[in-house]
Image (cartoon, rainbow, N blue to C red):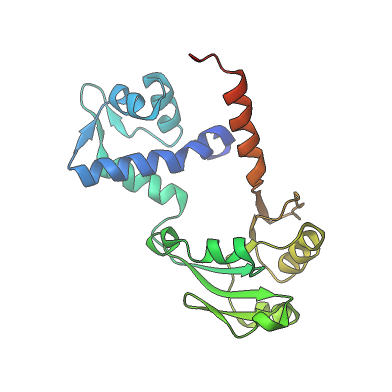
Amino acid sequence: MAGKDKVSEAVVRRLPTYHRYLERLAQEGTTRISSQELGQRMGLTASQIRQDINCFGTLGQQGYGYNVEELRGRIAEILGLGRAYHVIVVGAGNIGRAVTNYVGFTRLDFAVEALFDVDSTRVGERVGDAEIFSTHTLPAYLTTHRVDISIIATPAEAAQGIADELMEGGVRALWNFAPVDIAAKPGCVVQNVQLTDNLLVLTYHMLNDPAEQ
C-alpha cells in the first residue's frame, strides 16, 4: 500500500464514507466522477479528496476524474472487505442483540457466530443464527474456534476483564460498546464506542450553533 506508514487516522476514518458513497454511485450507474463532484456529495473540498486518495497511490486521471468502480474496489481492498470475518459478541443484552441483528454485517461478510452472557437463563437462546453460550465457556471456545473480532456489550465493570480474556485468547480486534474505555495490549486494536458522546456533541451543536429561531 503506497504511503501506508504515513496515512493519518483522520484519513482512515473517512475511508468507510468514501466506500459508502462510491457504492451508491455505482448502484446509480455512475461510471466516473471528479474530485469536485465527489467532494460536493461528501461535504469535503476537491483538494481534500485528492489528498486522501493519493495516500494510497495514483488512482485518478487529470481531466477524467476517478473510475467509480475501480476506486470503490481499491478502497474495499484497503479496508479488508471481500473476505469473511468470524465475529462473536460478549453480552447478550439489548445492545448485544441489536448489534448481532444488524443486517449490514451480513452484506459485508461479518458473521456473528456466537454470543456469550453471564445470565444462565439466556444460555441456549438464539439471536438470528447465533447461539448464546455462558461466558464461562469463552476460554474453551477461543481455543477451538477462529475469532477475528469480538464485540463487547457488557456492563462497564466487566468490560476490561472480558477484553483481557479475549486478548489472551488471541482475538486481535475488539469493538467495545461498554460504557467505559478499555485498554488494548500490543497486537490488538480497540474501537471504543461511547454512544452518549455523539449524543452530547449533537446537543452542544443544537444549543450553540447559530440558527434561525
Image coordinates of residue 62 in percent, x first then y, are: 25, 22
Is residue 199 shown above or below 43? below
Residue most extreme to the front: 213
Residue at the image point whose x is 21% and y is 34% from the top: 32
Q: Quadrant of residue 6?
A: top right
Q: Quadrant of residue 206?
A: top right
Q: How many marks?
A: 0
Is residue 33 shown above or below 192? above
Residue 96 seen: yes
Side (left or right) of 146 relative to 143:
left
Is residue 24 shown above or below 210? below
Residue at the image point whose x is 42% and y is 24% from the top: 44
Image coordinates of residue 118 in percent, x first then y, are: 74, 76
Side (left or right) of 125 relative to 23:
right
Side (left or right) of 57 relative to 116:
left
Image coordinates of residue 99 in percent, x first then y, are: 54, 61
Residue at the image point whose x is 21% and y is 21% from the top: 63
Closest to the observer: 93 or 100?
93
Closest to the observer: 128 or 94?
94
Residue at the image point whose x is 67% and y is 61% from the top: 153
Image coordinates of residue 203 in percent, x first then y, are: 62, 30
Is residue 69 shown above or below 63? below
Closest to the observer: 116 or 57?
116
Side (left or right) of 38 relative to 81:
left
